Image (spheres, rainbow, N blue to C red):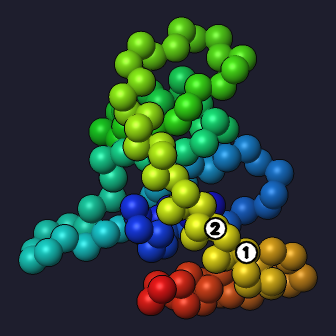
Amino acid sequence: MVVVDGKGLPLGGALSSASPAEVTLAEPTLDTVAVPRPGRGRPRKNPKRVIGDKGYDSEALRHRLGARGIELVAPHRRNRTAPRLKDRRPLRRYRKRWEIERTFAWLGSFRRLVVRWDRDFTIYSGFFHLACALLAPR
């Protein structure tokens, strides 16, 4: 998983196998983010909001992120058991998700990341960070 800013610049990422659900990987991925502040001070670790797709619609994740001061913007699943939120205004930010998906498409252009041939995790992780570094100037 990769955390990017609003313009598609990769800020942090966490790698794991393909089998776990994205909801379980959200918090470890957010822990890798450290955006330096202008001037002095600790780096900022918690963004104001996180935009995710329907796979992130989980009440438990909403509560855990809310405790950290992060707003989760994700459309509701069709089979949602909890009542839907009444106000749909935060979902207006979801329209800008194409900028985030563009970064995932750029990462997909690195064939070595799409199909994992490397058995060693450190080599795969190195190529992932190299690809993120190459995406930064774009």
Residue 89 visible? The answer is yes
Query: For the residue carrying disc 2, how many other residues have a C-alpha within 10 Å: few (<14), some (14-19), or many (20+)?
Result: some
**What residue did someone put label 2 on?**
104
Mark 1 burial class by Cα count in 10 Å: few <14, some 14-19, many 20+ = some
Name above or below for residue 83 compared with residue 38. above
Residue 82 in percent (x, y) is at 57, 11
Q: Is residue 84 left or right of residue 33?
A: right
Report the front residue among 9 and 63: 9
Residue linked to disc 1: 108
Q: Position of residue 128 (x, y in %)?
A: 65, 81
Give the residue drawn at x 90%, y 82%.
117
Disc 2 + disc 1, Cβ < 8 Å: yes
Q: Is residue 43 left or right of residue 29?
A: left
Of the pair 56 and 120, the residue shown nearer to us: 56
* Looking at the image, residue 11 lies above or below residue 53: below
Disc 2 marks which amino acid?
Answer: Phe
Q: Is residue 68 visible?
A: no
Q: Quadrant of the N terminus?
A: bottom right
